Amino acid sequence: MTRRLYIETVGCQMNMLDSELVVASLRQRGYRLVDSPKRADTILFNTCSVRQHAEDKIYSALGRLKHAKRHHPDKVIGVIGCMAQKDQHQIFERAPYVDLVVGPGQLQQIPDLIERVTLGAGRQIEVSLGRKDGTREQISRSHESYDPLRDPTMRPTPFQAYVRIQIGCDKFCTYCIVPMVRGPEQGRPPEDILAEARILVDQGTKEITLLGQTVNSYRYTAHGKTTCLSNLLESLQEIDGLDRIKFVTNYPKDMTDDLLDAVHDLSKVSPYLHVPAQSGSNRILERMKRGYTVEDYRDMMHRIRQRVPEAAVTSDFIVGFCSETENDFKQTIDLVRECRFKNCFIFKYSERPGTKGAERMDDDVPEDVKKRRNNELLAVQNEICEEENLKFLGQTVEVLVEGPSKAARKQASSENVVEQLTGRTPSDHIAVFNGNARLVGRILPVRIYDVTPFTLFGDIVTDHVGPEVYGLELASPP
Ligand code: SF4
């Protein structure tokens, strides 16, 4: 019997990839994806623990299912991903009608666990070991990299795909729960990554984004040979049919010259670098245990500008971290003004139980101050985005066409042959232009005629077909 699956995903690209893989493995068992929990008999929430807000959202979504479960006790409800690893049995206490709790290191077990629930075995929980529950080897083994066969129909577009190259994190920033829920940092064997990339390209993928919590710290050692990210990029460059390679998220301290040179020299590697700074104050960076100073970050930016002058750099910032003063915040604004990022993701500090920040520091910046700082920093960054985007006016950029723009999707009409399309440049700028839906998946030149802080507007450049193409002799002027 076909079972109907509904899955809701919150969080980062790692979670999006995990959901794609979970859905693919369930489809192999005969599941069909549906678009609402009402129509589903299996409901999964792939969760995030990075901010309280993301967790609250999941608990309220679970609350809304309480009655549905009472009336349809056969519905299987599962909480998977980071929150499952963090809260474990607590999820059953808060929502006793949940059937399944599965951490991100155990996702390969989901099909069997659901089957056990449906056969009447009761609640199922599978989580990995905590960071203090064994040797590094044992803990690493309990966080398995989940890499089953890929299913192109599960991706937003078949020509773009994520590829995980690393799991876990060993940096232990004091605000971050990731090292606890995703386990120790482990690089995937390069041959597995390359094999997966080749399969994706055979399936029609043109752009691959390599994923890791600190992707540029990637290392894999076997038989006395260590492969780092720049080596991996060199091998991926050789894959015929692959056009673009991106990688996220970078750790400032591991942005080596060697990697920057690879970004510059390898034609398929996008000059796009996401490198979270988190704060412009050394005092706060130290409390965050980020492992670098503002001077180190500036030095990295300087090296990026020298070695990859065409690079678009984006960053993350946390405002209102424990004890952050107006002066600390001002230094963050100064850094943002100085670095002129392509874009910044700005977050208000959210205390996470289980982190050093929560155990040892006071979350003492009032919410209204966090909000104000967030808005101020955002306004500064938006100004920079607009100024930087103005530089694209009149330029022709290469765009990978992703599909109809948001506006076009809203007013979708089958009669429209020409519609508004959207795509991305190699530097990850979003471009919007008119074109035929058949162009989706192609890389095209687009000339930019207008910009906003977040979007470039342009026209596809069509080739001029003149007499020279046909070898015609033009009459000489009299
Ligand atoms: S580097 Fe820091 S912020 Fe990033 S995942 Fe690791 S602990 Fe979290």
Image (cartoon, rainbow, N blue to C red):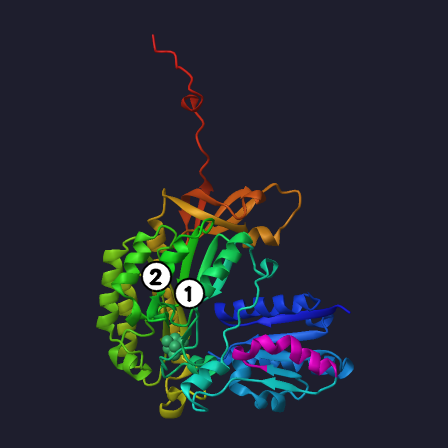
The image's mark for residue 190 is 1
| Residue kind at label 2, given as amino acid type | Asn
Residue 247 on image: x %, y %: 40, 62
Residue bearing the label numbered 2:
231
Q: Is residue 466 above or below residue 341?
A: above
Asked if labels 2 and 1 touch by Cβ distance under 8 angstroms, the answer is yes
Residue 186 on image: x %, y %: 42, 75
Name the dominant secondary structure of the magenta segment: helix
Instruction: Write down the region rendered in magenta.
Output: 102-119
Residue shown at 42%/70% (left/top)? 212
Q: Which of 212 and 77 lies nearest the eye of the viewer?
A: 212
Q: Which of 284 and 148 lies nearest the eye of the viewer?
A: 148
Residue shown at 39%/84% (left/top)? 366
- Quadrant showing the N terminus: bottom right
Q: Callout 1 environment at 10 Å: few (<14), some (14 to 19), or many (20+)?
A: many
Q: Quadrant of ligand 1?
A: bottom left
Q: Is residue 117 magenta?
A: yes
